[in-house]
Image (cartoon, rainbow, N blue to C red):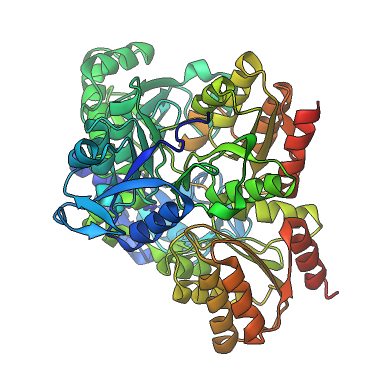
Amino acid sequence: MKIHEFQAKQLFRDAGVAVLEGVVAATPDEAAAAFSKLGGSLAVVKAQIHAGGRGKGTIKNNPAQRGVQLVRSADEAKTCAANMLGQPLVTIQTGAEGQAVRRVLVESGCDIAREWYLGIVVDRGCGLPVLMASTEGGMNIEDVAEKTPELIFKEAFHPDAGLLPYQVRKLCKKLSLSGASAKSADKFLKSLANLFVKLDCSMIEINPLVVTKAGELVALDGKVTFDDNALFRHPQLADLRDKNEEDPNELRAGEAGLSYVQLEGNIGCLVNGAGLAMSTMDIIKLHGGQPTNFLDVGGGANAEQVTEAFRILLSDKGVKAVLVNIFGGIMRCTTIATAIVAAYKQVGFNVPLVVRLEGTEVDEGRKILADSGVDIINAVGLTDAAQKVVAAAKGN
Amino acid sequence: MSILIDKNTRVVCQGITGKAGEFHSKNCIDYGTKLVAGVTPGKGGQTILDRPIFDTVEEAVKQEGANAAMIFVPPPFTADAILEAVDAGIKVVIAITEGVPVLDMVRVYDRIRDTDVHLVGPNCPGVITPGECKIGIMPGYIHKPGPVGVMSRSGTLTYEAVWQLTNLGLGQSTCVGLGGDPIVGTSFIDLFKMYQADPKTEAIMMMGEIGGSAEEEAAAYVKANVTKPVAAFIAGRTAPKGKRMGHAGAIISGGKGTAEDKLAALAAAGIEIAESPADMGAALQRAMKK
């Protein structure tokens, strides 16, 4: 689960990780009031969306307005917020449509001496959370990681021990922090590592992390995502979810316990298992088609969930044909067949449906379909399924 | 021979009284697996599927000689169930459960690394040695005994590959689903080691996915250590770069993880590449004829 920058910063503040003063605003007037409340001679207005690259991103219908802007008066804050609020912001991480800005964060300025990068993520390689720091902060951090990985300093830590004192000393040495700055880093880094563990985060990223002229570390940005599998341990985090930031079909699928990603093609896919779902998309493309979605019904879905999956697929007017590719394991073919029949009765199929079934209870599943009278195109094997659905989507 | 499990493996199912646990335990028994006991805390003394239920894994080991565990307990309790099996002396632990918190697995993995315990999963279909023992949720009928070792990060993609192999007349020595979570107990390299050492395995089929660097590391291992023919498929070649938040995932892998990187690394190691998911069985056949 993703959250907004202003929410992440509140979590940082509560955990003892230094952030600047800021006020959230949902209207231009609130933004102006926020500027006055902060009381400084300048402030930064930052669009709040669940995507990075905001500083270089632009408002879709107003390319002169970027997603982060320095303002020097309440009036400027108001104008800037008016430009952003209600408008889609397009960044390298949003896709061409952008994401609508519903709130802005108005934040005090600070005297920046240096801009760095800081992140924590669980590393599949070593099986532990890893804190990564680099003096090469900014948008090009991925290039830094690829071309000069030695400039990214990494320290793995056990969740129950946290970041150890010697690890902080190592990092401070590499980052050339000493004296009061090292002391500030000690509190900052340990608090952040503890927060990562305490809330079962899957990622924390601060880019840029700034060192002020006074030598203090401050989080100028904050991105936090939580491990969805661990949300049951943190019911209070449910309040931080912003469903406006999620694709409506993905949201609907998520509520039905399905994994769905919206794409731009015209062939709807309903598959069990992420690897097979990706492979199904691969083979559709190989045969000249374009999948409109990734839909993994998972292992334990029941007939009702699968019926909902069909409703979501068929509600997309761009879909010209649907491919059901099920290799039953924990999922039984009978469950899928029953759901296809139910969906046909409840929703009706206005586009051709190609079905490929194999695995657990396949014979019973095929019989349910054959006896139902539902108009389907049967496929045997992956290539046959892909060829048939691509042809069907073209109207052949 | 085979790897991990065979006809002498004695299985205890943790979480056997749950819906999935019972359904799949029955399927395993029907397949011929020596499933000797179940464990559900609080239900010790009862029976299910004509097998005794114990409160603890320790009792199942002592009284029924269990030496492998199949875990179906719900996600909040999975890490505890794995550690209980390890504590009871079980060396092959297969966790089917999907949805285990990542930091739980970090703690589990830290306990079992550098031990002789083989943990497979979580979020995996399990392990099968065709004709001898099935521990997991895979459909038994698609398999047949034979010379090919199969491994994958994805469950249903493993079934797909196995089905293609079987239809080509190529049976399998042992098939392993590694599991799709960020932290799982067994890596491709662990299995390459075992397949290379197993006399019954003559060729190895691996299915990877975009993301992470496990496939690149496996390719390097194969180049240096594996003499048996290997074929591979990478799922997600056409997957669009989805909406992302932040850079941390890309930074930790140092820019690796695209399908192109993985395919190049595999090909450089002399591994036969399946160009489409329909080509997996045929690719293994080509690798064996090389």
Q: Position of residue B43 (x, y in %)?
A: 16, 56
Q: Position of residue A235 (x, y in %)?
A: 23, 58
Q: Is residue B238 left or right of residue B18?
A: right
Which image quadrant is residue A326 in?
bottom right
Residue at 23% in and 13% down: A179
Which image quadrant is residue B206 in?
top right
Q: Is residue B196 left or right of residue A51?
A: right
Residue at 44% in and 49% down: B136
Of A255 and A306, which appears nearest the observer?
Answer: A306
Q: Is residue B15 left or right of residue B206?
A: left
On the rendered image, what quadrant is the C terminus of chain B found in? Answer: top right
Of A94 and A290, which appears nearest the observer?
Answer: A290
Q: Position of residue A379 (x, y in %)?
A: 74, 67
Q: Is residue A382 visible?
A: yes
Of B91 and B103, which appears nearest the observer?
Answer: B91
* Figure check: A269 above or below A220: below
Which image quadrant is residue B22 in?
bottom left
Q: Is residue A58 visible?
A: no
* Figure check: A47 above or below B79: below
Q: Position of residue A96 (x, y in %)?
A: 64, 56
